[in-house]
Image (cartoon, rainbow, N blue to C red):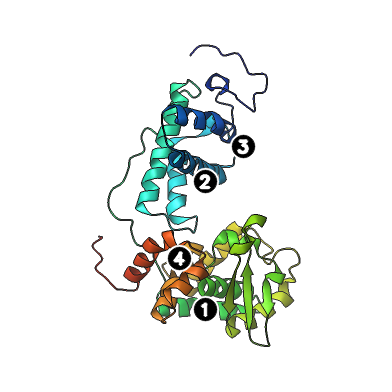
Amino acid sequence: MAQRQLPLFPNMPAKPEDISVHTSLKHTLAVFQTHLLNEGKTQHTLKAFTSDLHLLAEFSGDERAIGEYSTEMLEQFLNWLEHGRGVPCSRKSYARRVTTLKVYFKWLFTINAIPHDPALPILQRSGQAPLSEILGDEELSALLAYTYTLRLGEKPDARPEMLLRLISETGIKKAEAERLVPSDMVRLGKDTAVMVIKHASAKDIYKERRIDLSAKFLDVYDEYLQQYRPQTSLFTCTPRNLEYILADIAVGAGLDKKPSFEMLRWTCAVRDYLNGVDPDAIREKLGLSKISWVETFAKIKRLAGEGEDDET
């Protein structure tokens, strides 16, 4: 590979020749967009590819240099999109995001910005997305029964049950739970309250949603407040530790399944559907658009045992 002259402002490449293995992903986007336009791609494709790469940056950290991306990391990213992000990823979206990775890293390789193409070995998948796991009524009851014993232990701990009830009753995503503050729980009466889910961006204030909280949740929530006395954030630990708490609950309850935010989110949606909640109310509760709801609702009905499941 020929030796390159470093650009005057290495963090802001103006042309392909300015990009090297040390350039961060976010600083390549403008040049990549120009490349797409020169290739005759539509504005729709440009916006979709850019959005996909923003997701990759969210997963890996937007300061990560393009030379640090490996095939394994890209596969972990795709797995996160399907199973760890907490947002439905349709087959169509998954396929496009694989295409985005292939086009983007092939371009970087072609302009000699990286020594090899990490997206080359990644294969497209065909067929329907596999159904997510959910908890049955007996399994959820077993988990709740175990968390109740923790509330009565030598060192009473209400956090496991509060977390389990919060996610299984509201279906919120991990990122939303991470942003919660005590004031987001708005009391309407002794045994009634709503949770206000705010968006990280101020411009999305009109997308805020209010989710009813049960009396059983409020009972354990009050215990949690007394024990942990949260100030700035509702949870006084990291999102990863919240996942560990859910895993520990399963071990304590003797359950083989490993509950996660995603599993509890789907469990919430299916339970609401089986309990006769209006589908549009479920959609709003989960914070989904009408477009993404089409596939999500079909999946909920299949998880509820309706329709033919042709997957093995």
N-term mark: 4 or 1: 1
N-term mark: 4 or 3: 3
Residue occupied by mark 1 = 144
* Circle 4: residue type: Met
Q: CA distance from mark 4 to mark 3?
A: 31 Å
* Circle 1: residue type: Leu
Front position in the image: 295 or 77? 295
Cβ atoms at labels 2 and 3 below 8 Å apart: no
Query: Can the viewer see residue 118?
Result: no
Q: Locate residue 117: give its quadrant.
A: top left
User: Residue at image x 75%, y 63%?
Assistant: 232
For label 3, the crowd category at 10 Å Cα-Cα, with few meaning under 14, some 14 to 19 and many 20 or more, is some
Residue occupied by mark 2 = 55
Q: Which mark is residue 63?
A: 3
Q: Nearer the viewer, mark 2 or mark 3?
A: 2
Q: CA distance from mark 4 to mark 2?
A: 21 Å
N-term mark: 3 or 1: 3
Q: Which mark is residue 263?
A: 4
User: Residue at image x 52%, y 46%?
Assistant: 55
Q: Nearer the viewer, mark 3 or mark 1?
A: 3
